Amino acid sequence: MDTTHSPAAAAGAVSEHAVEEARKHIRTYLIVGFALLCGTIMTVWASLINFHSREINIAVALTIACTKGFLVAGFFMHLISERKMIYAVLSVTVFFFVALMYLTLFSMADGSIIHIR
C-alpha cells in the first residue's frame, strides 16, 4: 500500500509546514521583543543625559518612542502584512491628527481669531 498519498502523510506534511511557520513567527516576535527592550533601556538612558537643549531632548525621546510604536504597530498588530485598507485608515488617522494639532497650535497663537476681543 502506498502511504505517500494517504491522509496521514498529508497531515504530517501540513503539520511540519505549520511548525516551521510558527517557528518563523516566534523568532520574529522574539527579535521585536528584544528590540523593544533595548528601546526601553535607551529611553531610560536618554532621560538621564542632558543634551543642553530642550528641543534635542524632546526629539530624541520622540524618535525612540516612534520607533517603538512602529515595532508594536507593525509586528504585533500585523500592520506590515495587512491589506491596503488598513493603510488607508491609518493615513486618514494621521492626517486628522496632524490637522487637529495644527488647529490647536493655531488657536494658541496671539493673533488667532480666538484671542481677538
Image (cartoon, rainbow, N blue to C red):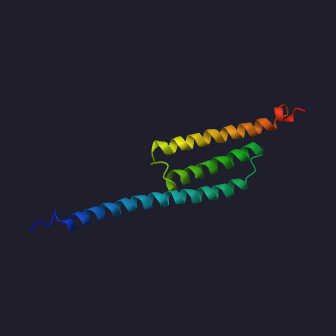
Q: Is residue 110 above or below residue 27?
A: above
Quadrant in which residue 15 is drawn = bottom left
- Which residue shows up at 64% across the image and 40% down it? 96
Question: Percent x, y for residue 81?
Answer: 44, 48
Looking at the image, residue 8 sits to the left or right of residue 117; the answer is: left
Along the line of sight, which residue is nearer the eye, 83 or 40? 83
- Which residue shows up at 84% across the image and 31% down it? 111
Q: Is residue 13 above or below residue 67?
A: below
Question: Percent x, y for residue 45?
Answer: 68, 56
Looking at the image, residue 7 sits to the left or right of residue 48; the answer is: left
Q: Residue furthest right?
A: 117
Question: Percent x, y for residue 102?
Answer: 72, 37
Along the line of sight, which residue is nearer the eye, 24 or 14? 14
Quarter containing the C terminus = top right
- Which residue shows up at 76% across the image and 50% down it? 50
Looking at the image, residue 37 sits to the left or right of residue 21; the answer is: right
Looking at the image, residue 6 sits to the left or right of residue 105; the answer is: left
- Which residue shows up at 61% across the image and 41% down it? 94
